[in-house]
Image (cartoon, grey):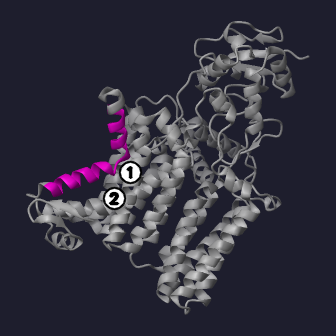
Amino acid sequence: MRLPDATRGPIVTRSTFAALAARATVTPSGPFARFLPALAAYASLTIAGILLLALPGAGDHVGPLSGDTLRLLQLRDLLAGQGWFDLTQYRLGPEGGTIIGLSRLVDLPIAGLIRLFAVFGQPPLAAEALALTVWPLTIATLFIAAAGFGGRQLAGMIGMHVAFGLASLYAFTSLRFYPGAIDQASVQMLVLLALAGLLIERRRSAAAHGMAGVLAALLLAIGPETAPLVAAASLGVALQWAWHGQAFGRAARAFGLGLALAVTAALVATVPPAGYGQLRCGGFSLGLVALVAPGGAGLFLATRLAGSLSRSLRLQLVGALGLALAAAALLLAPHCLAGLFSSPDPLLGDLGLAEPVETRSILAQIRLAPEVAGGFYAVGLFAIAVCVFRIRDRQQVEAHLLLGALILAGWLLSLLQLRYASFANVLSILPLSFLIADLRRLSQAEPENINAGFAYTIAALAAVPVVWVFLGTVSQKGIGRFITVSAMTRATAPLPPAGACRGASGTALLARLPSRMVAAPPESGADILRFTRHRVLAVAGPVPGADQADGRQTLLQIGLSPERQALDLLRGANVALLAFCPTDEETVAIARTHPDGLYAGLLKGNVPDDLRLVAPPKPGDLAIYAVRPR
């Protein structure tokens, strides 16, 4: 990487970095030069900051995402005796329930924490609240540790401290690591960052690469949406073996074997034998394992049997293996590949409604919320550029090739669906830590070099997603709109808009009624499942592994259809109660675009004879209408 230098001529080259590093006057010393004491310091400060922000105004112990609530429901069902292999939420969707692809591998430690706190005398809700506080903070600590490990592999102790700092800022500004956040995204970010750190481990040891293979399998078991990133990591390992041959053979074999064995073990541990023949696109199933396990085994056998081949033949062998797996994926599950980036229901666009935040494309995000778009895309793009310059200057080429490929994969995927932006951002911590560490050495070695200090400061700021959100928000809305907790924590975690008719108070009237099927706004659906014993047709946002198409379509059709047709749809779906929220965004949009529909009539106060208002609602609560039988 080349930087301007006002004191020594037009440029500073990579050789200058080495000389200046030796002359650097400030290096970590004392106990904080060691990994664990430094980790304890960074994690303690981060956790203290999170608790200071989160606890004083906390009105609930569960996070704001539907995924948080659905996992809580799954945990409660598991602790109440629902089968380990049974991932069905029986109160979601039409008759028979809906299978939710939330992995039991994440459920297990959280359920263990709830049981642990209950053993120590905590009542059920208190044990649950403690577990939902401890779990995300534990993941935050491990996330910081994974970043520090990767930073040390690239840039030594200074890189470790920079990575600790960047990861701490990321955790502090992302609600994914706050109390109540039990959605799987934080675990995926942790595992992905640890996987990347192990793959760039300096010694290229078999142990590190074997553990990386296990983590790659864990990523897939938690959520198959990470398959493109696992494929990129696996291809990187295979290409390293093809290039180096026997010198990299043990590491590549360990990765392939660890991946094949771990993904098979995950299948046995989380999928019942009766489900082995099922191909579930949104969940972990035999279809995915049938691709991954042979791929890992193929890499193991290739490195074992073909290590003595020439480099050209090894490259051809890797290419053939990759093409075979790609062809198998297209043959076995072409609809799964297409569904990975499927568009939202076209009816949402017709109604003028935005698609779910996590599934937005970059164009939709820029159109709907341009002020925060930089927080999702800028850091990843910066890291890709840094990797390109490092490769050009031949500085730790293979590590930057691997990291650059992983970040590029996540970043390109984020252009199609916003949920991948967090993966690109967390992976960016590693190459940007190396850059900032180098610039720090340069600035410390020559404090009179203004350009070096300026470059160091700019690089450090540009590596933090919340800085880009700050700049975008200030430019669009002024500084007063940014200095809030909600604005800061949107920097790295896309969140749905807040709405009324939510929570225990909004569903209080429903909770007093006998259990029935309820047609409710999707934004209220998860809360109805949590605070009542009713069933709902659909909940808001993408639900991992769940197909809500039928229930979602029925809900939309009920609202936009004329009175008689809407009532037929309600009865056809066995709906006994209609929960109506006059301020819900979707409800208002349906009423605006279909003025002759049921929702438009209810907003005007025109209640059909076959609907009976159960009780006058309080402001902000759901209005409950009982559907009269035929």
Q: Which mark is residue 316?
A: none
Q: Are marks 1 and 2 in contact (CB under 8 Å)?
A: yes
- Against 624, residue 87 (above or below) is below
- The secondary element bearing badge 2 is classed as helix
Q: Which residue is mark 2?
A: 432
Q: Secondary structure at mark 1?
A: helix
Please provide the residue range marked out in magenta: 451-474
Q: Amino acid at mark 2?
A: Leu
The x, y position of residue 213, in whole percent, is 56, 70
Question: Which corner quadrant holds the N terminus?
Answer: bottom left
Question: Is residue 456 on the magenta stretch?
Answer: yes
Give the farthest residue toward the bottom: 308
* Residue pictured at 83% horizontal, 24% vertical: 569
Residue pictured at 49% horizontal, 47% vertical:
136
Q: CA distance from mark 1 to mark 2?
A: 9 Å
Dividing the picture into quarters, in which one does residue 530 lie? top right
Residue wearing tag 1: 379
Q: What percent of the width, then of the height, locates residue 626?
A: 79, 16
Residue 39: in magenta span = no
